């Protein structure tokens, strides 16, 4: 009879999520170096970024469909293999095409981690899912803090971008060793089949929350991924801002239980949208120390978006199972990937406009970043309306004045 060590599996899951987050943070930190070395425009860098966000949803779709059949262990094997190959290929990339392929593989690995670990943790801690999922998701912002500080330190020491990528191989090997050494639980807590999961997706509520996820993910990840380009000339350190923002997010997620319990998930999402909008608008106007103040508001606004959206599906659409959790995360990453070249295009266009008006290069970069942030503020602003509608709808259901069959 096999023995399942929940603590070691949870640790392996957290380290795998740290790798996922480090790929995100270090990629954000080396964008300028990649652009200089390979002579890429911001639009082309946007396409490189988008590969990670395209690989992620493909992996969550595949993983969500296969999870009931093959389980978490094989998905974690896949994640480890793709992380290792993707990181090595990035180090030896010879140009734009090599960066596209290697970044896609890393994104696929990241999606495989989410597709495996969310339902795995739900199974292992079946009676304490919400708390443990929040503790797991602490390590996405936590990993970004690690990656952002590492990138800033290594860049400051004139260490090339290849060494920064190589750094991530260390935690990859650690989580791989843990995964290969452990027995995984059977899917004994899976209450529905994949066919039932798929059928349960065909509801207005799932489609509505999927649309909202495209906006929450882009508001959070789209802004963070371009932080160096958006705030590089605003009189503050972009990597320190990224570390500060994600550090606050990690703390907020660790103590999310009482907040969610008091406000309910929809109330949390509505309040988060308001604060995120204010934070991004302030960042678009701030320079110097005020950038840090506005970034704190942004962090408070986006910190609960991702885990609360996943938790919403688990709580309100439980029959969608692992497939529902995987797909809603995949939809968010897919949308973020689609917006990456657009964000890069905004930066290119606004910079060109400023330069044409006689503004010197550094001021043009600042103007481009501020104008792009104004555009990004539209995403959480739309969410205020959508989550407001959802808040009203759920309130009516709880009052019994609306048919709860949705």
Image (tube, rainbow, N blue to C red):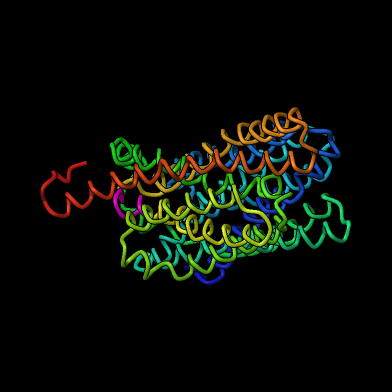
Q: Is residue 38 above or below residue 229?
A: above
Q: How many marks?
A: 0
Could you tell me residue 137's position as x and y percent?
Answer: 51, 61
Please name the residue shown 72% across and 58% down the image.
237
Residue 175 can be seen, yes or no = no
Q: Which residues are magenta?
A: 312-318
Could you tell me residue 350's position as x and y percent?
Answer: 67, 33
Q: Residue furthest left?
A: 401
Please name the residue shown 66% across and 42% down the image.
369
Please name the residue shown 72% across and 39% down the image.
102
Q: Is residue 279 above or below residue 64?
A: below
**To which quarter of the image does residue 73 belong?**
bottom right
Q: Is residue 299 above or below residue 277?
A: below
Which of 218/315 is in front? 218
Could you tell me residue 56's position as x and y percent?
Answer: 57, 42
Residue 74 is a magenta residue: no
Please name the residue shown 38% across and 53% down the image.
269
Which of 53/44 is in front? 44
- Tell me: 399 left or right of 161: left
- Tell me: 109 left or right of 115: right
Which quarter shows the C terminus? top left
């Amino acid at each position: 009879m096999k023995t399942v060590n929940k603590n070691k599996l949870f640790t392996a899951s957290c380290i795998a999520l740290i790798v996922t987050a480090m790929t995100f943070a270090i990629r954000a930190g080396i964008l300028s170096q990649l652009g200089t070395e390979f002579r890429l425009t911001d639009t082309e860098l946007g396409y490189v970024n988008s590969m990670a966000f395209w690989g992620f949803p493909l992996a969550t779709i595949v993983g969500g469909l296969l999870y009931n059949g093959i389980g978490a262990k094989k998905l974690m094997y896949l994640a480890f293999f793709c992380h290792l190959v993707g990181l090595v290929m990035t180090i030896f990339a010879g140009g734009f095409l090599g960066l596209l392929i290697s970044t896609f593989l890393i994104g696929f690995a990241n999606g495989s981690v989410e597709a495996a670990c969310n339902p795995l943790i739900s199974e292992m801690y079946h009676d304490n899912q919400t708390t443990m999922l929040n503790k797991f998701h602490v390590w996405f912002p936590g990993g970004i803090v690690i990656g952002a500080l590492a990138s800033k330190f290594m860049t400051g020491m004139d260490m090339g971008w290849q060494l920064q990528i190589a750094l991530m191989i260390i935690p990859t090997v650690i989580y791989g060793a843990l995964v290969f050494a452990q027995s995984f639980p059977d899917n004994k807590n899976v209450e529905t089949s994949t066919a039932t999961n798929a059928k349960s997706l065909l509801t207005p509520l799932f489609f509505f929350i999927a649309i909202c996820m495209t906006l929450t993910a882009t508001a959070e990840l789209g802004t963070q991924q371009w932080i160096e380009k958006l705030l590089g000339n605003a009189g503050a350190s972009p990597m320190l801002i990224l570390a500060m923002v994600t550090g606050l997010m990690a703390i907020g997620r660790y103590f999310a239980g009482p907040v969610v319990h008091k406000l309910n998930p929809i109330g949390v999402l509505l309040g988060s949208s308001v604060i995120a909008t204010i934070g991004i608008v302030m960042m678009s106007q701030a320079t110097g120390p005020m950038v840090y103040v506005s970034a704190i508001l942004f962090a408070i606004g986006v910190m609960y978006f991702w885990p609360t959206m996943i938790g919403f599906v688990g709580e309100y659409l439980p029959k969608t199972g692992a497939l529902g959790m995987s797909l809603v995360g995949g939809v968010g990453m897919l949308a973020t990937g689609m917006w990456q070249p657009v964000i890069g295009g905004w930066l290119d266009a606004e910079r060109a406009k400023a330069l044409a008006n006689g503004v010197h290069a550094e001021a043009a970069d600042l103007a481009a970043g501020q104008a792009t942030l104004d555009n990004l503020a539209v995403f959480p602003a739309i969410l205020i309306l959508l989550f407001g509608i959802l808040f009203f709808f759920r309130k009516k259901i709880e009052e019994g004045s609306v048919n709860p069959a949705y």
